[in-house]
Amino acid sequence: MFPSLSLCVLALLLVSQQGSGIRWLALSTSNQHINKTQQCKMLPGLVSSQAQLCRTNLELMQTIVQAAREVKKTCQKTFADMRWNCSSIEAPKYLPDLERGTRESAFVYALSAAAISHTIARACTTGDLKLCTCGPIPGDTPEPGYRWGGCADNLHYGLLVGSKFSDAPMKMKKKSGSHANKLMHLHNSEVGRQVLKDALVMKCKCHGVSGSCSIRTCWRGLQDLKEIAMDLKAKYLSATKVVHRPMGTRKQLVPKDIDIRPVRENELVYLQSSPDFCTRNEKLGSVGTQERQCNKTSSGSDSCDLMCCGRGYNPYTEKVVERCHCKYHWCCYVTCKKCERTVERYVCK
Ligand SMILES: *[C@@H]1O[C@H](CO)[C@@H](O)[C@H](O)[C@H]1NC(C)=O
Ligand SMILES: *[C@@H]1O[C@H](CO)[C@@H](O)[C@H](O)[C@H]1NC(C)=O
Ligand SMILES: *[C@@H]1O[C@H](CO)[C@@H](O)[C@H](O)[C@H]1NC(C)=O
């Protein structure tokens, strides 16, 4: 036996097993309608207990597929102005990057946990899930002019069922992934769900003669996932590096530099520092910023200086079509012409 080969195989096995925590995101590529229990074992990325949940709650799977798509779309939109643009979700071969316990994996786990519960809670409201209904009507009486009505998002059910599914890989008895990584992923998933709980807000609809809004019907509804992702991005930027060390009788995650305090419930934590994502390094999950678009007038993370890591940038021109010369006609419509305009854009060298 060639020792280097067996080592290599071992390393591959370790990577693929550790990768199981959010492998269910691969469901975003599933285009079949899941309506037979036999399909559960063929679905990509599920650990055994998730496949079991699939068999006992088949109806839920379409909602989970939708959640996986939402995670991918929302992550990439939220990070479009950053060097790391959530490309790890796109290319399965970069998935191991998300298992190294970096700040980026902290964000993806938190967003995934929030998204799955968000999607389930909403599916209860829309009637896509028959096992649940609207959330409860709040016990407190609203202000005068307001009354409870409508259909609340069923956050309670979303959290219950969503966490059961998304935490399943980290709760497996089998030795897969390090204990420290599992603790990290569980913690960050919980942070995601906490942000989701804070996103349950009062939404109202106006009633009354010709829009007078003399009475409002209100319910508790969740903000859109992109708002939740923005909150999590702020937490990503201020995430705390932790180490795995004995605290009392068991090993726990504690802040690395200021280890006199326990980890806070509302902060994202990570174990491994990230690369700067400037250059291509497949092993570290970095695709580099070459050819990325940058903004010459911005002073933020999408500025050409920061995005291109000082390598400089190339201009190119692009034609954009816009509505112009708009005219208002009495009554009541607007007509516009189409104008073409040339804009200068920049990509990193
Ligand atoms: C399951 O879904 C497939 C594909 O959409 C459809 O052709 C089939 O009739 C469905 N079966 C049942 C039992 O609903
Ligand atoms: C992320 O950046 C890479 C490298 O520049 C690029 O190929 C990819 O299309 C980008 N992904 C998204 C979703 O913008
Ligand atoms: C570039 O950044 C400026 C300032 O933040 C912003 O107003 C502008 O819309 C951005 N341009 C593009 C093409 O994103």
Image (cartoon, rainbow, N blue to C red):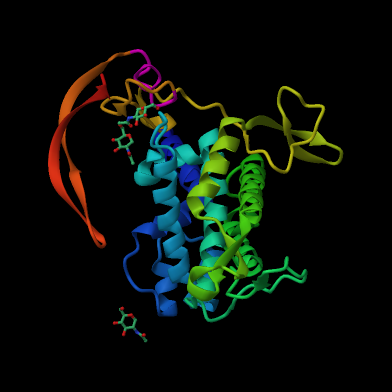
Q: Nearer the viewer, residue 247 or 177?
A: 247
Q: Is residue 12 visible?
A: yes
Q: Give the x, y percent position of residue 341.
A: 15, 33
Above-or-below relation of 90 to 222: above
Residue placed farthest to the front in the image?
330
Location of the C terminus by quadrant is: top left
Quadrant of the rendered structure where residue 69 is? bottom left
Q: Is residue 93 left or right of residue 229?
A: left
Between residue 142 and residue 200, name the one nearer to us: 142
**Residue 205 sits in which quadrant?**
bottom right
Residue 129 on the magenta segment? no
Q: Nearer the viewer, residue 93 or 34?
A: 34
Name which residue lies at 62% across and 32% down. 239
Q: Can you see residue 20?
A: no
View extreme (right): residue: 248
Stretch of the chain drawn in magenta: 300-310
In the image shown, does 318 or 307 lie closer to the viewer?
A: 318
Whether 195 is drawn above or below 33: the answer is: above
For the stretch drawn in magenta, the main secondary structure is: loop
Q: Is residue 309 magenta?
A: yes
Residue 61 position in % (x across, y down):
46, 70
The quadrant of the picture occupied by the N terminus is: top left
